[in-house]
Image: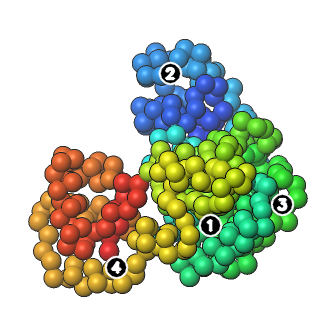
Amino acid sequence: MYLCLMNNQLLYGIALTLVPGVGDVNAKKLIAYCGGAEAVFKEKKKNLLHISGIGERTVDSIVKQDVLSRAERELLFVEKNNIKVLYYLNPDYPKRLQHCYDSPIIIYSKGVSDLNVEKIVGVVGTRNISEYGKMLTEKLVSQLASDNVLVVSGLAYGVDTYAHNAALKNNLVTAAVLAHGFQTIYPAANLGLAKRIVDSGGCLLTEYISGTEPDRENFPKRNRIVAGMIDCLIVVESASKGGALITAEIANTYDREVFAFPGRIGDHYSEGCNRIIKEHKANILTDVEDIRNIMRWSEDKKNCAKQMRMFRDFSPEETKVMEVFANEDIVYLDKIITETMLSPTKIASILLSLEFDGVLTALPGKRYQKL
């Protein structure tokens, strides 16, 4: 019975992604208004037209339900190929990404990997990686091995390839976000790498249904998934324009920390990194400790705080806030506001007090961690 309900939820969730003109933001509006993806397709046309941003042409597509047969074929495809479907309201969906306004409502995952681990780092850069860039990428990832991070990249030539390979070499789990469906791997030269990622406990991720080709316009959309599911982004090398800088820009809009290696003035593939550092869109990165310090990855502080919390009494309002952390160590500010029903001003005061007392710590991206 549960499996049947899950399949129904996924079927209609997939179908909603196929409706022309809906998109990620409007899909979430529809689901929130109707109470679920399946309910969207059963809602009356006149009611759907009341939803802001949903036009008559889109509503007609929903009412016709032509997309359901294609969604059924996709569900058969994922079951046959052992692909997991991550629905944005389910607990296995990447929580960091879940809070991004334009996150996809459906992500397909090949491979079994926990996408909600404590530390997730994105590594991106030019396809035309230099010997210097190769050295930086491999050294950085090897140094991050002791932090047990999940390494996320895009399986492209250059920096992406070296980041994934360095993660595998250092026994780190890595996830590759694709800009196409699972009927292929692009670039084809990375087919073996993709297989090793899955075999080692990592995963391949995409928002695209099978049959979707790696078209040019898919790559910027892919970049928002990389930027949204991580704690911080590292740009190794980049020209003055390119996908890595698009990812960095998106990461900044999501309040993620961005780091960039500085390069020699005049080097073509250092121009992008030098520029975003100069414009204060990235922290300068010269050593792995720069990441650890800014991201506040300190175990000593956590252990000290646990001892302190044992001797502290919470007020009723503080207890409400701490109850939000009952099943999660890291929680977004929006969730605290929603679940406590306290005013933002009051919550800000409570969070500051709890942070001073070492109970919580503020993280980049409007998140708080229980210590």
**Residue placed at 63% from the left, 28% from the top?**
19
Circle 1: element type? strand
Disc 3: which residue: 190
Q: Amino acid at mark 3?
A: Asn
Numbered-mark total: 4
Residue 60, image x, y percentages: 59, 17
How packed mark 1 is, by other alpha carbons closer than 10 Å (few <14, some 14-19, many 20 or more), is: many
Q: Amino acid at mark 1?
A: Val
Q: Quadrant of residue 250?
A: top right
Disc 1: which residue: 151
Q: Residue furthest right?
A: 189
Tell me if 347 is positioned left or right of 58 in this view. Answer: left
Tell me if 311 is positioned left or right of 366 in this view. Answer: left
Residue 55 vertical position relative to residue 82 in the rendered view, above or below: above
Q: CA distance from mark 3 to mark 2?
A: 40 Å
How packed mark 3 is, by other alpha carbons closer than 10 Å (few <14, some 14-19, many 20 or more), is: some
Return the residue nearer the eye: 310 or 355: 355
Q: Quadrant of residue 139?
A: bottom right
Q: Amino acid at mark 2?
A: Ile
Disc 4: which residue: 302
Circle 4: element type? helix
